[in-house]
Image: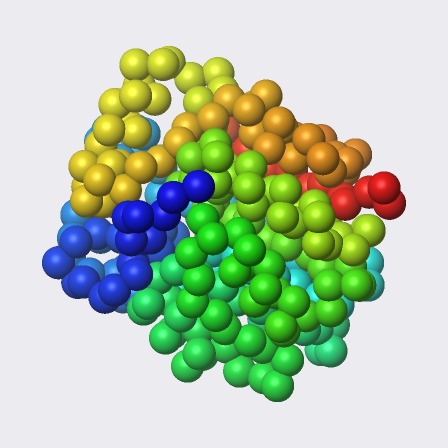
Amino acid sequence: MTTDSAPPGDTFDPTTAVPARTYAALRGASKEAFGPDREAVDKLKKAIHDKVDEVAQENAAALVRAVRHLASEGHLQFADLGCGKPVQGGDTLELPDLYEAGVAVRPEIQWLALDSDELVVTTCRALLRGPAVHVVQQDLRRSAAVLDAMGTHLRLDRPVVVILGAVLHFLDDGHANDLMFALRARLAPDSVLVLTHVTGHGMDPARIKSGQVAYEQLHGGIPIYVRSRDEIVDLVRDFRLHNTGVLPTIDFLPDPTERTPERDAPHFLMLMAKRPEA
């Protein structure tokens, strides 16, 4: 696979919206974004759904629930691939960053935060504190380099939780499958994938296309791949789906103490899948 184009946020540019900052703004952490990112949020709400910000917030909440759940089950190694900017509770839901959610359950957790965005990496290095935290700048399209980074900082002969939260939809089928193949080949049995992904499942195709075009135009041509439920499941075909199945993020390990989300918004799909023994 070629990776001729620069990955999102590879070099800092405050004049163009980038996915990591737009996502932070959608979550309500506007201070982590710039004018073009906030403008992108306003236009996405008009092009896709007026609750698209709530979709991002519920995605973040579901990932926190998953990390807490897996840490409570005894998982001690986590790799957050495409980790995004830490917001330290500065979002609408006042959520902890994923590392903080995990370490609150298991203080001895080993954590790798990896992203292609230069500002994300700089922010992670400043804010994610602890001797067991490692931060790497890398392009997810370079699957061998991603796995090498994981192997440098984590024990790949032991189970690892790999978080792919709202990132695989920035990879085309070739690169997404390459990454899944590399993870399957090098992860230890009982490693777990946690995946959230935009979807067109059950939506009007014309609305999907207009939202996709709007997103790409607002982010300097960065492509986004809107996949169906079956296409998302196919990405993890070499892993074993958790018995929770494939669900909208709002239904994944729900917490009755959290707010009641808008059900008709186009929420991401979410799944967990385990690396089998053979």
Q: Position of residue 210 (x, y in %)?
A: 25, 23
Query: Looking at the image, which residue sits at the far bottom?
Result: 131
Quarter of the image with the C terminus in it: top right
Residue 111 lies in what quarter of the image? bottom right
Residue 62 in view here: no
Q: Residue at x 86, y 45 (%)?
A: 277
Res 153 → quadrant: bottom right
Above or below residue 45? Residue 104 is: below
Image: 220 above or below 172: below
In front here: 128 or 155? 155
Q: Residue at x 16, y 54 (%)?
A: 16
Kindly identify the residue that appears in the image at 55 percent across and 33 percent down.
269
Q: Could one spot residue 150 in this view of the protein?
A: yes
Q: Is residue 49 left or right of residue 141?
A: left
- The number of discs equals 0
Q: Position of residue 155 (x, y in %)?
A: 73, 69
* Position of 72 relative to 175 (above/below): below
The quarter in which the N terminus is drawn is: top left
In the rendered image, the residue lying farthest to the left is 15
Residue 146 horizontal/vertical position (percent): 54, 59
Residue that protrudes farthest toward the right in the picture: 277
Viewer-nearest residue: 91 or 44: 44
What colour scheme does the image use? rainbow
Q: Nearer the viewer, residue 255 or 270?
A: 270
Task: Please give the name of the residue rendered at 31% of the width and 37% of the height, measured from the top-left corner.
Answer: 223
**Residue 23 relative to residue 259: left or right:** left
Position of residue 122 in the picture relative to residue 201 (left or right) = left
Q: Reply above or below: 244 against 59.
A: above
